[in-house]
Image: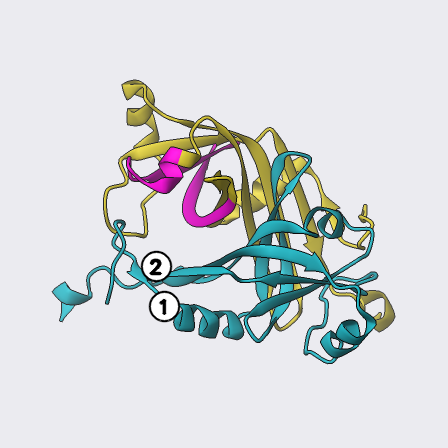
Chain colours: A cyan, B yellow
Amino acid sequence: MKLDSAGLQILSRQECVALLVSASIGRIVFTDRALPAVQPVNFVLDDEDIVIRTGLGSKLAAAASDAIVAFEADEFDHSTRTGWSVTAVGPARAVREPGEIERLSTLPLHPWAPGDHGHYIVVRAEQITGRRLSRRHDAREN
Amino acid sequence: MKLDSAGLQILSRQECVALLVSASIGRIVFTDRALPAVQPVNFVLDDEDIVIRTGLGSKLAAAASDAIVAFEADEFDHSTRTGWSVTAVGPARAVREPGEIERLSTLPLHPWAPGDHGHYIVVRAEQITGRRLSRRHDAREN
C-alpha cells in the first residue's frame, strides 16, 4: 500500500476508474470569468471518459467546452472518518456529431435536475488520481 | 421560491450559511500549475469564513494561499434524487498571526487525515451561492 506525504493511500488508475463507476454524482471544476467554479453533476463513465448532460445555454456548457477541467467524485463516512476521492483532469468537449449524440443517449445517464439537458459534454480523463483515507488506528486496535 | 434557469431552487445567503454549518466535508477548488485542482477537506465555519487545516508543505497550502478559491459542499440523496449544493468564492489566506492561530485552534476542527495539520487556511466567503434540487413531481403527486 503506497501512502502519500499526508498519509493517505494512493489509488491506482484502475482502482480510481472502479470507484468512478460506483459513483453517480461528481463535481466539475472549471473557470468562469477568470474565477474558479464548481458544479455538482450526475455522470456516467463511457470507457474511461466522463459523460455529463447539461442545457445548451448553461454556464457549464459555455465554460467547460474546449477547456481543461477537473472532475471530482468522493464518498466519506462521517462515523468512521474514512472515505475516498478521485480526481480526473483533462480536456472537455461539447459533443456535436449526431451519431455520437445518439450513441451517448443510450447510456444510463438521466439528469436529476429538471429542464433541458440535451447537450453532452465529454471529459477525457488524461490524469486520474485518487486517495483513500482508511481508519487511522487499525494497527493499534488489532 | 425562486428558481434558476435550470429549475433549481435558488438559496439565500442565510440558507447557504446554515447548510455549510450542517456540513463537515467540502471541496476546495484552486489552480495548481495552471490546471484546475480540487481537494476534499473537512472544515468549520468561523462566523462566515471557511476554516481548514493542512500541512505547511502541502500542495493546498502552497496553491491556496493568497489566491481566489472556490469552496463547495453538497449533500445528495440518491433514492429521492434530491439535494443541495453551496459554493463560496473568495480570497484564501494562510494564517500566520500566533494569536489568531491560537483562537482558531479552539474551533471544533479535527483533521480526518493523519499527518501534520498545523497550518490554517481561511477562505473569506465573499460570494455564496446555493441551489436545492427538490422532488420534481411533487406538484403532480399532490
The subunit letter for the residue under badge 1 reads A
Secondary-structure class at tag 1: loop
Residue B81 in view (yes/no): yes
Nearer to the camera, B128 or A107: A107
Res B16 quadrant in image: top right
Q: Which mark is residue B97?
A: none
Amino acid type, label 1: Ser
Q: What is the count of numbered marks?
A: 2
- Judge left or right: residue A77 versus residue B21: left
Query: Mark 1 or 2, which is nearer the eye?
Result: 1
Q: CA distance from mark 1 to mark 2?
A: 22 Å
In the rendered image, residue B9 lying in the magenta stretch gets the answer no
Image: A68 above or below B58: below
Q: Mark 2 — residue?
A: A81
Q: Looking at the image, is A52 positioned above or below residue A109? A: above
The kind of secondary structure the magenta stretch mainly shows is strand
* Residue found at x 25% / y 54%: A7
Query: Who's the residue at 44% across and 31% down the image?
Result: B122
Tell me the SS state at disc 2. loop
Q: Position of residue A55 (x, y in %)?
A: 80, 57
| Three-letter amino acid code at the position of disc 2 | Arg
Q: Is residue B78 above or below residue B105?
A: below
| Membership of B54 in magenta stretch | yes
Q: Which residues are magenta?
A: B36-62
Q: Position of residue B95 (x, y in %)?
A: 36, 25
Q: Earlier in the sequence, mark 1 or mark 2?
A: 1
Say whether residue B4 is left or right of residue B31: right
Which residue matches tag 1? A12
Give residue B80's position: percent from left, percent from top.
Answer: 66, 70
- Label 2: chain letter: A
Q: Dividing the image into 4 quarters, which one contains the C terminus of chain B?
A: bottom right
Residue in the picture at 73% in, 80% down: A106
